[in-house]
Image (cartoon, rainbow, N blue to C red):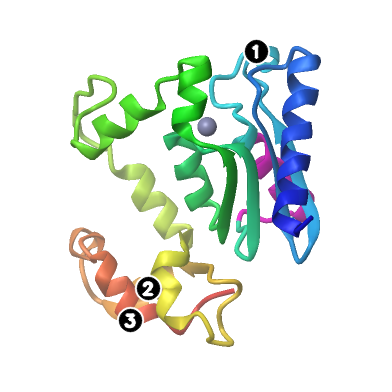
Amino acid sequence: MDSDERFLKMAVDEAFEGIRAGHGGPFGCVIVRDGDVVGRGHNRVLTESDPTAHGEVVAIRDACSRMKTFDLSGCTLYTSSEPCPMCRAAIAWANVGRVVFAASMKETEDVLGFRDQKMIDALRNGEDLTPSDRVTFDGYLEPFYEYRDRDGVIYRGFEDSNSSRNSPSTVSGCFLISHSQITSTLHPSDSRSSRLRLSRSTFRSNFAFQNSV
Ligand SMILES: [Zn+2]
C-alpha cells in the first residue's frame, strides 16, 4: 500500500469514528508532514453545533494547535471526500501544500445530497451565496489604521511568496510583514490614505525577499 492510500484510509477511519460517536457527517481528515501525522479530525457539526466544523477544518485546527503555527506549508491534507468550497478556502489560507481525497464531490452528493456544487457554481458565476449589503460610516476603517499603527503583522500566503520560494529569508513560503516596515520603507512621508492604497502587486514586487520571519 502506498503512503497516499495509507493516509487516506486513516482519514476514512476518522470518518467512521465520527459517525459512530454521533459527532456529525461521515467525513474524516488527517494532515501529514514529512511522513508523520501532525493533525487529524472528523466532522463535528452536530456535536459542536458548529456548521464550520467540517473534518478538514477540524484537522487544520488540530495541526496548527499542535505545531503552534497558522502555516501548514509542506503539509499534505488527506480527506475522505473532496473538500467543499469552505474547506478549500481554509486549506488555501493554511498554505497546505497538497490535497488528496477519495470520494468525489459527485459521489458524495449522489449518496448524501449535499449542495457543494451549487455553491461552487454560484461562486464561479460571481453570485452572492447570501444577500449582502455594504454600509459605510465614519470610522469604519479605524481598526485597520490602529492595527497598522500598532505595528500589526500582515500574513502573506504562499501565492504571494511563490517567486521567492527558495530564498533563505522565507519560511515555508510564508511571509509575515509588519505594517511599519512596509510604510516606512515604501512611503515614509505618505499620508495614511495613500499608503492604504498600496496594491498587492506592489507588496509582491517590493517585499518578495525581505522582512519574512
Ligand atoms: Zn468542508
Image spot of residue 90 (x, y percent): 51, 43
Q: In this rendered view, identify the residue nearer to me: 39 or 4.
A: 4
Label 1 crowd bin: few (<14), some (14–19), many (20+), radius 10 Å: few
- Look at mark 2 in the image and give the residue it sits on: 182
Question: Which range of residues does the magenta coloring cover?
Answer: 58-70
Q: Is residue 188 visible?
A: no
Label 3 crowd bin: few (<14), some (14–19), many (20+), radius 10 Å: few
Image spot of residue 120 (x, y percent): 32, 34
Q: In percent of the image, x 44 and y 29: which residue is there?
A: 106
Q: Which residue sits furthest front?
A: 1
Q: In this rendered view, identify the residue nearer to me: 95 or 151.
A: 95
* Residue 29 occupies quadrant: top right
Image spot of residue 45 (x, y percent): 62, 18
For marks 3 and 1, give the CA distance: 46 Å
- Look at mark 1 in the image and give the residue it sits on: 46
Q: Is residue 145 left or right of residue 162?
A: left
Q: Is 109 contained in the magenta span? A: no
Q: Amino acid at mark 1?
A: Leu
Among the two numbered marks 3 and 1 on one chain, the one whose residue lies closer to the N terminus: 1
Label 2 crowd bin: few (<14), some (14–19), many (20+), radius 10 Å: some
- Look at mark 3 in the image and give the residue it sits on: 206
Q: In percent of the image, x 27 and y 32: which residue is there?
A: 121
Image spot of residue 23 (x, y percent): 72, 16
Location of the C terminus (image quadrant): bottom right
* Distance from mark 3 CB to nearest ligand 1 atom below 8 Å: no
Numbered disc 2: secondary structure: helix
Q: Is residue 197 left or right of residue 91?
A: left
Location of the N terminus (image quadrant): bottom right
**In the displayed structure, would residue 191 be above or below residue 213?**
above
